[in-house]
Image (cartoon, rainbow, N blue to C red):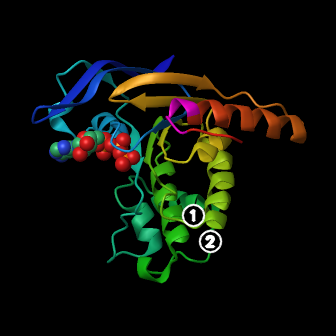
């Protein structure tokens, strides 16, 4: 069953067509990465799905669940609230604090509940943002370059964490990224957007065997780089 259904979505800014008839389906629990050159319309599409772009409504069809969560490149925590209160904020029910603590433990931030956002590193702040998103058990997680500002090592840790979390919570995920390796490491399907249209789709099926896996990843990487208009010799 589709969690996301988009048909013929168009978005124009002044005279410029940024989304030019996007069709997209995302199934329950599916992890989709959205790649595309700078300016191809990735963030515009994500904002339209998140309901943050009111003018995108009414052009084409956008069906998304009500219970969706969004994470951005910057964690966007409330600076006047502690880590725990950032995750609790907006949660209902007598067990809200317990659920928030569990979510913080899942992102390996137990013990940091009373900290203030400014006391955390960029990666830790991003983990709070993930906890805040996932504690609501959303059916859809929209992520716009969530690891784009992190160093390479932290990024790899975050990939492992996100893979683990999405296996537990099973939200459908749409991840906007510039990073081809990230897309291959995380997604079951990669979509390439070009001039506001879906130009290519790639299912990511990797063998378990380490060596075969590395070879297949490289093949897919090469194919995607060609789709992105990047010449490769390796
Ligand atoms: N509010 C706006 N007003 C005018 N133009 C806009 C607006 N938002 C986006 N655009 C334009 O739409 C185009 C696509 O922008 P978008 O942010 O969706 O691209 P992107 O694929 O996410 O790029 P990047 O990878 O660089 O983040 C760009 O040319 C941008 O200038």
Residue at x 37%, y 67% (from the top left corner)? 77
Instruction: Check residue 202 for magenta coloring.
Output: no
Horizontal and vertical percent for residue 195? 33, 30
Residue nearest the observer in this picture, 124 or 229: 229
Horizontal and vertical percent for residue 73? 42, 58
Element type where label 2 sits in the image? loop
133 relative to 203, above or below: below
CA separation in Å, label 1 and label 2: 6 Å
**Horizontally, is 36 left or right of 186 in the view?**
left
The residues colored magenta run 226-230
**Horizontally, is 228 left or right of 16 in the view?**
right
Element type where label 1 sits in the image? helix
Horizontal and vertical percent for residue 224? 59, 33
Residue placed under numbered mark 2 in the picture:
110
Q: Is residue 7 visible?
A: yes
Residue placed under numbered mark 1 in the picture:
104
Residue at x 50%, y 35% (from the top left corner)? 228
Q: Are marks 1 and 2 in contact (CB under 8 Å)?
A: yes
């Amino acid at each position: 069953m589709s969690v996301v259904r988009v048909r013929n979505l168009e978005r124009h800014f002044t005279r410029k067509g940024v989304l030019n008839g996007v069709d997209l389906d995302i199934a329950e629990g599916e992890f989709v990465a959205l790649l595309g050159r700078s300016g191809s319309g990735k963030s515009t599409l994500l904002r339209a799905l998140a309901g943050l772009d009111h003018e995108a409504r009414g052009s084409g069809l956008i069906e998304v669940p009500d219970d969706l969560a969004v994470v951005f490149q910057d964690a966007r925590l409330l600076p006047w609230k502690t880590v725990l209160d950032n995750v609790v904020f907006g949660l209902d029910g007598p067990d809200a604090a317990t659920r928030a603590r569990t979510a913080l433990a899942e992102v390996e931030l137990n013990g940091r509940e009373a900290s203030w956002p400014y006391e955390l590193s960029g990666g830790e702040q991003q983990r709070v943002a993930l906890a805040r998103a996932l504690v609501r058990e959303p059916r859809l997680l929209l992520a716009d370059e969530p690891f784009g500002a992190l160093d390479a090592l932290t990024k790899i840790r975050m990939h492992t964490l996100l893979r683990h979390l999405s296996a537990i919570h099973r939200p459908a995920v749409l991840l906007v990224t510039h990073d081809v390796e990230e897309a291959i490491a995380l997604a079951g399907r990669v979509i390439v957007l070009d001039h506001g249209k879906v130009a290519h789709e790639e299912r990511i099926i990797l063998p378990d065997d380490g060596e075969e896996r590395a070879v297949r990843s490289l093949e897919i990487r090469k194919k995607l780089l060609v789709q992105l208009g990047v010449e490769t010799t390796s």
